[in-house]
Image: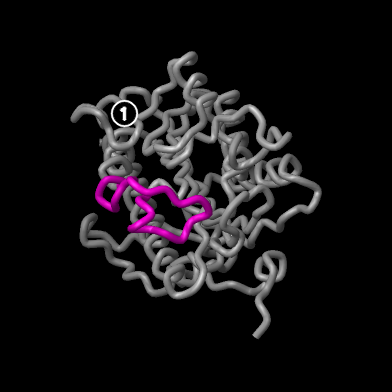
Amino acid sequence: MPTMGCEEEALEAAPTFAGLDSSQTSTDAARFVVIPVPYEATTEWLTGTCHAPGRIIESSTVLELYDQELDLDISGAGIATARAVQPLPSGPEAMVARVKDEVASWVTSGKTPVMLGGEHTITLGAVQAIRARHADLSVLQLDAHADLRDEYLGAHYSQATVMRRVRELCPITQAGIRALSETERRYISDNRLPVVFWPPQDDLWLDYLLSTLSNTVYVTIDADVFDSGFLPSVGTPEPGGLGWHDVWSILRAVARSRRIVGFDVVELAPEGRQGAVCAYTVARLIYRLIGYIHSHNEQQGAVHHG
């Protein structure tokens, strides 16, 4: 059977996240909307990130809807799945603008966006949309790479420059970083950016990370933040990274103490049987983070109305 291209796959009718109802009625009532963005244009090494949204959603249909850590059927939060945002051939800047419009439309409708990439460049569009509604926004980046170049191969909009562009909009905090250029390292030092390099140098790193975030947070998770031995199917794998529980020590603490107004997972490249396992792992992460955000919002609502 011939392999489909990214555009063909994006146009295919896809299952919904966790197999949940995404009828118009259900979508109207949902608090979260999963937005697939199968875009891949500036990837420089391993390809296949454009296939990740579809594979993540497909694997999510075998998730247990009950989560034992939260003691909760997370599907009760209300999770809808949007149609895939179609890639634009005119370049990454135009694609960022398309993502911004898509995310803005859902945020205006009162939804919490959960974006599935695709390459990391698309994060900029989501942050642009959310920053327009939340002046106090900060961004938490979980990533092996700094992505702080001002330009890369002549481009200002790419996976290697995305966090430089995001920082032009709002404060950022980085965690998991273990691969960067000398220029990026100087930029971090010169601008005193809050970065938790991995492995951390002391036991106070999580308290430090939390102290750098505002009350309103957008989270961007590059799948290569995980150690490449644990999650190898990524666009740019790096050894020496975080394990499952390391990532959850961060996400759990942020979700419990801050208001997460959206998040994305990018740079998965799920090819073959190994890729299917990695896609399921990411789907589990997404589903549980939705649960944590929902639980925190419910608790805050109870406090305000108590």
Q: In this rendering, is residue 33 above or below 179?
A: below
Q: Amino acid at mark 1?
A: Leu
Q: In this rendering, is residue 165 above or below 5?
A: above
Q: Is residue 108 visible?
A: no
Q: Which residues are magenta?
A: 226-247
- Judge whether residue 267 is colored magenta: no
| Residue occupying the point 44% across, 71% down | 276
Residue 32 image point, x, y percent: 48, 53
Residue 55 image point, x, y percent: 51, 68
Classify residue 193 by image quadrant.
top left
Q: What secondary structure is the magenta-colored segment mainly?
A: loop
Residue annotated with mark 1: 210
- Judge whether residue 244 is colored magenta: yes
| Residue occupying the point 61% across, 45% down | 122
Secondary structure of the residue carrying numbered label 1: helix
Q: In this rendering, is residue 168 above or below 127?
A: above
Identify which residue, 21 or 195, lies in the foreground: 195
Classify residue 149 by image quadrant.
top right
- Image position of 83 (left or right of 136): right
Residue 246 image point, x, y percent: 27, 45
Residue 209 image point, x, y percent: 32, 28
| Residue occupying the point 55% across, 30% down | 148
- Residue extending farthest to the bottom is 1
- Residue extending farthest to the top is 190
Colour scheme used in the picture? Answer: one colour
| Residue occupying the point 39% across, 69% down | 277
- Residue extending farthest to the left is 203
The quadrant of the image that shows the C terminus is top left
